[in-house]
Image (cartoon, rainbow, N blue to C red):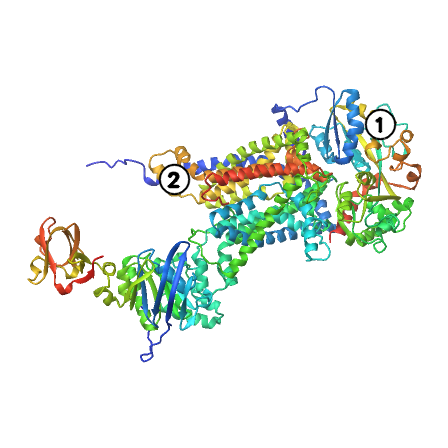
């Protein structure tokens, strides 16, 4: 499947998207408070991912931006306009649903042209814009098909096209790639990233898959129980997590006690084994549980003090160094460890 | 060197043999109902319709010529089709908000709404007509309300005109649309309305572009049932309408019973039947008859939108009004039954148990009740067995046969009961079948079996065939598999179909008028006599007893684990 | 029904062993039209007859001539004596469902000549006339008396009710238009006359709130205020007056009908039937009937047995009988179908 090459004029990077400012959002369902007090800034053209486990409030927040839920307190501003009480149909946001929500009785073309028809766009203009958008997502040949005649990936792209065709201020995506297999997911992720770059969209993306979040985002917002724990660039969050929770959430992380009410966190790729340990490294003794091959490296699972430590070892690791049951030294450079206050 | 010996017959031969025997079983299963309908429906009616082509014992088209030449018949036919169409439209329009409401509220409220829909549905049409007449009179409570509040200066004539017939017939036929439409709403993906909103659609657009197309199978299924029923109606129109609302079935009845002009009656009946078959054909061309069997779309429902659009809110109000419309006469009838005056007034000036006492003391009422119950139970058994076996058989058949058999089994529903009744009378009276209730049982079974058939067919469609295959693959014989796997899954629909059959029998007036004698007359016949010739207030008390019984059955069904609310 | 089917039915009948219950002990199967009429018959005739003779009486309703014909065709006659009006009696005779009643079966010497019929014993005379609401037209003010008054919507405004069937209505329409009662059937014999009657119906149509189908309806409609005037049966009006409903009726214009009791051909209890017919035609029985419903006896001898006060309520006073138009049942038997079609057509738009 080819990613459409979009030729856009070199000196004008169009910013299709607008900024979103959430202030003091409070939302409760009966006795349960989903969002106690959330404020968030999404800049123009930013790919912002709301990342969290289920129940973290990320979908609720997305729905509030979309207008499907009204906050009990707080405001939503898009491009400086207060839209907190604006009806959904007037917010000019594009939404891609988890199960795509394509109109089953309409062809791809009709689905994608729907928002333009709602805006009373002329039929020639509609044809032009729909074809352009379908082109963007490589769905032109499938324009006459019905949703049930499409594969998962094709439905996904149709839903995307429908959400983009009317140049929304923001594009919201609610775990849209969850139903796809890994290869397809990656391909669409790339395509999404390209679209984002070419069109300058503002995207607010909800997922629980941290790998996906890091892959796609300019800005990650980590939510836990309705509160923003940390937000920032993926590299920053990965390398300098503010808490054990964030460290453990984004990427894999090993935790050991650092003494004096401190916890040390080490990424598996920073764990050194046996002969690779240097004198100055912090060192522990453990026992190999098992090792699995994952293409790029060996994953070695080490038993240490009732914990399981995960280490990535280079692909040419010797057999002996990964035999289950064998004792193994492991450790890391002091500067590779991240320090947290003990939870 | 070995001679190749076939160890077993080629696989295709086995498969063919198995398919052949399965087809044979399927045909055998459907046979009882086919034979029953041929003997007791097609045969007698064909015989009766033959009369249309005879005048003075000679083959001629005189009857049809008379129909063409005399203006009244043309007028009445046009009136009939117009009224049937108008009632169909009214039913659809009013059912939409109600079905939407039922599909989008919490389970407990939904149950209350179901109660409001099913209770009048299962109450006698005569009862409801009496209640409406008491409510809608010139000096009745509705007009009193309107004039006191000042909405109008003069009381409005709601009765004995087009309005009266519309109210009466819509009220009786609405549930036929509400139920399949509800199923269609439930089958709709809840995220679609949200998606449409996010794409800029307002309430009206959402309805036009999303809701309407996706619920149309349900609507169309209901509409065709309403139309076919409405075209054959005459009791409600004759009680609540005027001469301009005279329906064809009344003329057929008059020509049979009063004028004794069988030829003309048969000619009229032929035309009516033609109109019905044409609509069925049109329906099949446009939508496919299988929509009638299961009017739901394929997707399962997901979580419903937490917020309603403004259109949605308006629909909720309309839906509540529709529910009130349905339940109002039933509620009104109850206090009326405790009135002591000689004719129906609401609210009653005096209260007492006079007419209840009369019901229990006058043996003719209790006997009639007993007769109705007896007949009803027997009919339920026959109709359920015949309808279910036929549905099971047809399910396994090729699609061409399926369509034909579907149409064949549905036609009895659309032929006016009066034709079937008269034709059956002539067939069965010589055996004494009228006086020992065999005739009325046969007649009611002809009426009721199609409903059971449709219900079970729909249920079989939504049954997971994998369950059947899994059980058979695990070594179960077909009867065992049926008993342990299919029957439990079909049970709710079986019960639904059986109840439907019982109610159809219990409520029938027209056939009872022909197929019973004074000794075994059913309750509706007695009630009709109580309304048609003179007003016997015992009718209202009898109605309330029936309503109470119906309510009890309904509450019982709702209480005993109706987790998945039954759909048609 | 087709002869072939009948043959098959008979064969099946032979094969089947279901037996029709036949009467054990003396019984009488009687069918009439329900309501106050049948109540009156029950109280004044059926019950005393049963008491006197020990014969058990079973009642049924709706003795449509078609049904009787069907019963005879299928040899399942369930009724012995039925009541019919003139037109239905004539139709029944044409279809051969009634037995001729000879003088040695029932002695009808004392019956009013105008009411006699070979195939029926006349049971009562009842009148179609104008009934009206006293609330709308109180005593001391202008009150409608004639059929012409009924048709005069300016002088007597308000909604009316008339019968859904044309018999008696057509006659009243012509009388209202100025035709003398004695000329009514002459006029109706011509197409122009029928047109004239139908024009009258057109005229009154917008003012008719309801076209009644059963005899109690006009009274109920007057009582509930649905209408202010009704063209209905005197017996029902009288019953309403007796129940203190504020209505009144006028004897100025009257169309009389005779009700008949007929003997069904092939009646299972023929003897009981004949006995009953003899019973109800007796003057004393006839007089008794008027106690329960204000219909007039068909024998002059009964008049002597009825007190002054009650006579006033009946159609059978000599003056009233003289001024009345008697319905021509032969005419209706011949023309009923076409006139009904016209009548329905005129009102169907």
Residue at position x 48%, y 42% in the image? B457
Query: Disc number at residue B468?
Result: 2
Q: Position of residue B442 (x, y in %)?
A: 59, 33
Is residue B470 positioned above or below A28 on the image?
above
Residue at position x 67%, y 32% in the image? B357
- Picture quadrant of residue B148: bottom right
Name the outermost residue toward the front: A260
Which is in the foreground here, disc 2 or disc 1? 1
Is residue B506 positioned above or below A1 on the image?
above
Residue B288 appears in view = no
**Chain at numbered mark 1:** C
Q: CA distance from mark 2 to mark 1?
A: 76 Å
Is residue B222 positioned above or below A163 on the image?
above
- Of residue B191 and residue C225, the one placed in the foreground of this image is C225
Q: Position of residue A221 (x, y in %)?
A: 30, 64
Q: Is residue B433 left or right of residue A1?
A: right
Question: Which SS class for mark 1?
Answer: helix
Name the outermost residue toward the top: C25
**Chain at numbered mark 2:** B
Q: Is residue C125 left or right of residue A122?
A: right
Query: Disc number at residue C285?
Result: 1
Task: Assess whether mark 1 and mark 2 are in contact (beta carbons under 8 angstroms).
Answer: no
- Picture quadrant of residue A335: bottom left
Q: Is residue B223 left or right of residue A43?
A: right
Q: Is residue B299 left or right of residue B142?
A: left
The N terminus of chain B, quarter of image: top left
């Amino acid at each position: 499947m080819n990613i459409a090459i979009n030729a856009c004029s070199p000196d004008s990077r169009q910013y299709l998207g607008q900024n979103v400012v959430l202030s003091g959002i409070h939302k409760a369902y009966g006795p349960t408070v989903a969002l106690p007090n959330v404020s968030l800034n999404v800049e123009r053209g930013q790919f912002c991912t709301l990342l969290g486990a289920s129940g973290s409030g990320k979908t609720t927040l997305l729905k509030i931006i979309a207008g499907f839920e009204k906050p009990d307190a707080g405001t939503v501003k898009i491009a400086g306009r207060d839209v907190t009480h604006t009806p959904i149909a007037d917010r000019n946001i594009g939404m891609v649903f988890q199960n795509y929500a394509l109109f089953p009785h309409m062809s791809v073309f009709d689905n994608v042209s729907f928002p333009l028809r709602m805006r009373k766009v002329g039929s020639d203009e509609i044809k032009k814009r729909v074809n352009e958008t379908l082109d963007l997502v490589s769905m032109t040949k499938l324009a006459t098909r019905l949703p049930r005649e499409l594969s998962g990936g094709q439905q996904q792209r149709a839903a995307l096209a429908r959400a983009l065709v009317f140049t929304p201020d923001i594009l919201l995506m609610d775990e849209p790639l969850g139903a796809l297999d890994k290869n397809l997911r990656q391909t669409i992720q790339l395509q999404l990233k390209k679209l984002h770059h070419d069109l300058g969209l503002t995207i607010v993306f909800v997922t629980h898959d941290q790998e996906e979040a890091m892959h796609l985002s300019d800005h990650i917002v980590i939510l836990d129980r309705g509160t923003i724990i940390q937000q920032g660039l993926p590299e920053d969050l990965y390398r300098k997590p503010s808490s054990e929770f964030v460290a453990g959430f984004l990427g894999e992380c090993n935790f050991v006690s650092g003494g004096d009410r401190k916890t040390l966190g080490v990424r598996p790729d920073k764990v050194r084994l046996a002969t690779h340990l240097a004198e100055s490294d912090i060192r522990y003794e453990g026992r190999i549980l098992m090792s699995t091959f994952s293409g790029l490296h060996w994953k070695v699972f080490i038993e240490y003090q009732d914990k399981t430590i995960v280490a990535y070892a280079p692909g040419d690791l010797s057999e002996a160094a990964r035999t289950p049951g064998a004792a193994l030294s492991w450790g890391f450079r002091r500067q590779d460890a991240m320090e947290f206050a003990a939870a | 060197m070995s001679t190749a010996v076939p160890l077993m017959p080629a696989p295709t031969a086995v498969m063919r043999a198995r398919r052949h025997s399965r087809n044979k079983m399927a045909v055998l299963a459907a046979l009882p109902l086919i034979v029953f309908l041929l003997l007791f429906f097609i045969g007698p009616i064909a015989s009766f319709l033959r009369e249309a082509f005879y005048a003075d014992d000679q083959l001629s088209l005189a009857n049809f010529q008379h129909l063409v030449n005399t203006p009244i018949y043309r007028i009445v036919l046009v009136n009939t089709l117009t009224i049937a169409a108008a009632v169909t439209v009214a039913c659809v329009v009013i059912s939409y908000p109600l079905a939407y409401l039922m599909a989008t509220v919490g389970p407990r409220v939904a149950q209350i709404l179901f109660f409001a829909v099913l209770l009048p549905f299962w109450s006698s049409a005569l009862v409801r007509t009496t209640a409406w007449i008491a409510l809608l009179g010139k000096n009745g409570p509705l007009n009193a309300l309107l004039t006191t509040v000042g909405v109008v200066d003069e009381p409005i004539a709601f009765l004995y005109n087009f309005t009266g017939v519309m109210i009466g017939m819509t009220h009786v036929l609405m549930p036929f649309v509400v139920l399949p439409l509800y199923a269609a709403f439930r089958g709709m993906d809840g995220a679609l309305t949200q998606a449409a909103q996010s794409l800029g659609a307002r309430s009206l657009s959402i309805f036009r572009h999303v809701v309407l197309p996706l619920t149309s199978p349900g609507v169309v299924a209901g509409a065709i049932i309403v139309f076919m029923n409405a075209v054959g109606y005459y009791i409600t129109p004759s009680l609540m309408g005027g001469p301009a609302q005279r329906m064809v079935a009344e003329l057929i009845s008059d020509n049979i019973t009063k004028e004794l002009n069988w030829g003309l009656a048969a000619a009229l009946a032929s035309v009516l039947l033609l109109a019905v078959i044409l609509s069925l054909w049109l329906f099949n061309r446009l939508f496919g008859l299988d929509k009638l069997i299961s009017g739901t779309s394929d997707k399962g429902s997901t979580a419903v939108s937490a917020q309603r659009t403004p259109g949605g809110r308006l629909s909720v109000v309309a839906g509540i009004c529709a529910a009130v419309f349905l339940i109002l006469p039933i509620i009104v009838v109850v206090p009326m039954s405790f009135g002591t005056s000689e004719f129906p007034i609401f609210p009653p000036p005096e209260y007492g148990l006079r007419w209840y006492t009369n019901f229990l003391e006058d043996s003719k009422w209790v006997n009639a009740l007993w007769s109705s119950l007896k007949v009803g139970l027997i009919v339920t058994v026959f109709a359920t067995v015949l309808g279910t076996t036929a549905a099971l058989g047809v399910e396994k058949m090729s699609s061409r046969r399926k369509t034909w058999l579907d149409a064949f089994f549905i036609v009895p529903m659309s032929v006016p009961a009066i034709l079937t009744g008269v034709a059956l009378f002539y067939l069965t009276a010589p055996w004494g079948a009228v006086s020992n209730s065999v005739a009325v049982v046969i007649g009611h079974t002809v009426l009721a079996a199609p409903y059971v058939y449709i219900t079970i067919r729909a249920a079989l469609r939504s049954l997971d065939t994998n369950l059947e295959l899994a059980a058979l693959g695990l070594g179960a014989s077909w009867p065992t598999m049926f008993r342990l796997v299919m029957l439990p899954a079909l049970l709710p629909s079986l019960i639904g179909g059986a109840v439907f059959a019982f109610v159809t029998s219990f409520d029938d007036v027209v056939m009872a008028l022909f197929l019973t004698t004074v000794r075994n007359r059913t309750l509706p016949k007695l009630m009709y006599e109580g309304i048609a010739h003179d007003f016997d207030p015992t009718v209202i008390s009898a109605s309330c007893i029936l309503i109470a019984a119906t309510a009890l059955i309904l509450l019982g069904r709702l209480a005993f684990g109706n987790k998945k609310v039954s759909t048609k | 029904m087709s002869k072939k089917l009948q043959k098959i039915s008979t064969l099946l009948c032979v094969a089947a062993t279901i037996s029709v219950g036949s009467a054990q002990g003396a019984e009488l199967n009687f069918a009439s039209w329900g309501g106050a009429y049948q109540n009156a018959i029950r109280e004044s005739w059926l019950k005393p007859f049963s008491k006197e003779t020990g014969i058990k009486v079973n009642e049924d309703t709706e003795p449509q001539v078609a049904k009787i014909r069907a019963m005879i065709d299928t040899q399942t006659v369930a009724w012995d004596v039925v009541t019919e009006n003139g037109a239905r009696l004539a139709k029944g005779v044409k279809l051969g469902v009634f037995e001729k009643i000879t003088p040695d079966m029932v002695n009808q010497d004392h019956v009013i000549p105008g009411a006699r019929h070979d195939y029926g014993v006349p049971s009562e005379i009842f009148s179609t006339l104008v009934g009206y609401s006293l609330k709308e037209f109180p005593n001391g003010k202008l009150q409608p008396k004639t059929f012409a008054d009924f048709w005069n919507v300016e002088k007597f405004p308000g909604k009316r009710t008339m019968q859904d069937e044309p018999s008696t209505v057509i006659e009243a329409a012509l009388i209202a238009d100025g035709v003398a009662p004695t000329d009514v059937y002459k006029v109706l014999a011509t197409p122009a006359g029928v047109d004239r009657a139908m024009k009258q119906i057109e005229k009154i149509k917008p003012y008719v709130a309801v076209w009644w189908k059963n005899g109690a309806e006009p009274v109920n409609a007057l009582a509930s205020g649905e209408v202010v005037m009704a063209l209905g049966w005197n017996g029902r009006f009288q019953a309403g007056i007796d129940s203190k409903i504020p209505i009144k009726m006028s004897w100025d214009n009257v169309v009389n009908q005779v009700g008949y009791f007929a003997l069904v051909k092939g009646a299972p209890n023929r003897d009981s039937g004949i006995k009953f017919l003899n019973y109800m035609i007796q003057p004393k029985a006839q007089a008794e009937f008027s106690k329960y419903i204000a219909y007039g006896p068909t024998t002059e001898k009964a008049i002597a047995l009825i007190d002054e006060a009650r006579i006033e309520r009946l159609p059978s006073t000599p003056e009233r009988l003289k001024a009345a138009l008697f319905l021509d049942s032969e005419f209706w038997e011949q023309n009923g179908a076409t006139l009904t079609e016209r009548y329905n057509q005129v009102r169907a738009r």
